[in-house]
């Protein structure tokens, strides 16, 4: 008898929890604007932009015309996945530079936040502050939930003519940099 009462009690509690979760999803879903899925295709021109880096200098994509660019978006400075990815690009930076590649990291964090993150981990490449999320939105990488916004972890390889050569919408921070460096080697070899 007591077992039946406990079972009935827990079933009501579980039902309320499931209903609350469903209600939360139903209410919050319209507020979520998963990245506006901007139609970016391999071969299309990469949208140009100008953003401040961690030193306060303005960095424009067009300034890198004539060389390969790894443009990677990441959610937040100094978080585990973002740190793993940034340190991977740091560790492969010399290999990228030997291939004539510039690496640009972009998030909605401020230049000051980027400076602390860059200094803490010795990042040798620009971290760009897209504080209003406009550039992330241009590339279909902005995610927002009401007032909370961040860049999705996505990467774009941009060729020397300013066209998108590869798009990575799903990124594993632990192995991504090696994947990107190898893709650039293959793309450069194919272009010869």
Image (cartoon, rainbow, N blue to C red):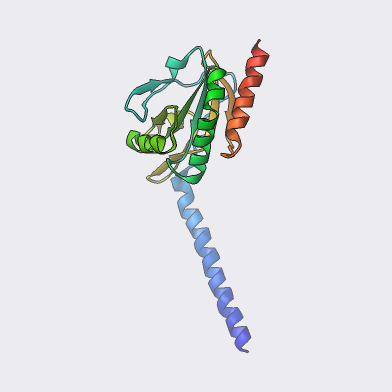
Q: Where 15 falls versus 187 (above or below)?
A: below
How far across and how far down the image is residue 25, in percent? Answer: 50, 54
Asked whether residue 17 appears in the rendered view, the answer is: yes
- Position of 106 with respect to 190 (left or right) is left
How far across and how far down the image is residue 162, in percent? Answer: 51, 16
Q: Give the farthest residue toward the bottom.
A: 1
Q: For residue 15, which quarter of the picture?
A: bottom right
Q: Where 127 falls versus 3 (above or below)?
A: above
Q: Nearer the viewer, residue 60 or 179?
A: 179
- Position of 146 with respect to 82 (left or right) is left
Q: Nearer the viewer, residue 174 or 121?
A: 121
The C terminus lies in quadrant: top right
Q: Where 169 falls versus 165 (above or below)?
A: below
Q: For residue 189, which quarter of the picture?
A: top right
**Residue drawn where x is 52% and y is 66% of the image:** 17
Q: Where 191 falls versus 125 (above or below)?
A: above
How far across and how far down the image is residue 159, in percent? Answer: 55, 17
**Residue drawn where x is 33% and y is 28% of the image:** 55
Q: Nearer the viewer, residue 20 or 128?
A: 128
How far across and how far down the image is residue 81, in percent? Answer: 52, 43
Asked whether residue 39 appears in the rendered view, the answer is: no
The N terminus lies in quadrant: bottom right
Q: Give the farthest residue toward the top.
A: 192
Q: Nearer the viewer, residue 27 or 96?
A: 96
Q: How many marks?
A: 0
């Amino acid at each position: 008898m007591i077992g039946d009462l406990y079972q009935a009690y827990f079933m009501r509690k579980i039902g309320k929890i499931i209903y609350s979760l469903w209600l939360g999803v139903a209410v919050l879903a319209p507020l979520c604007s998963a990245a506006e899925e901007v139609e970016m295709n391999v071969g299309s021109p990469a949208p140009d932009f100008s953003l401040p880096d961690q030193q306060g200098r303005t960095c424009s994509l067009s300034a890198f015309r004539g060389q390969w660019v790894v443009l990677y978006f990441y959610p937040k400075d100094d978080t585990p996945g973002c740190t793993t990815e940034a340190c991977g690009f740091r560790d492969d930076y010399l290999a990228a530079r030997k291939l004539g590649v510039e690496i640009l990291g972009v998030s909605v964090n401020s230049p000051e936040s980027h400076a602390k993150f860059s200094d803490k981990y010795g990042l040798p490449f620009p971290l760009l502050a897209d504080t209003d999320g406009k550039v992330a939105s241009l590339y279909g990488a902005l995610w927002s939930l009401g007032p909370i916004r961040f860049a999705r972890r996505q990467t774009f390889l941009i060729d020397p003519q300013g066209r998108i050569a590869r798009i990575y919408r799903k990124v594993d921070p632990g192995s991504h940099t090696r994947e990107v460096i190898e893709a650039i080697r293959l793309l450069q070899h194919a272009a010869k």
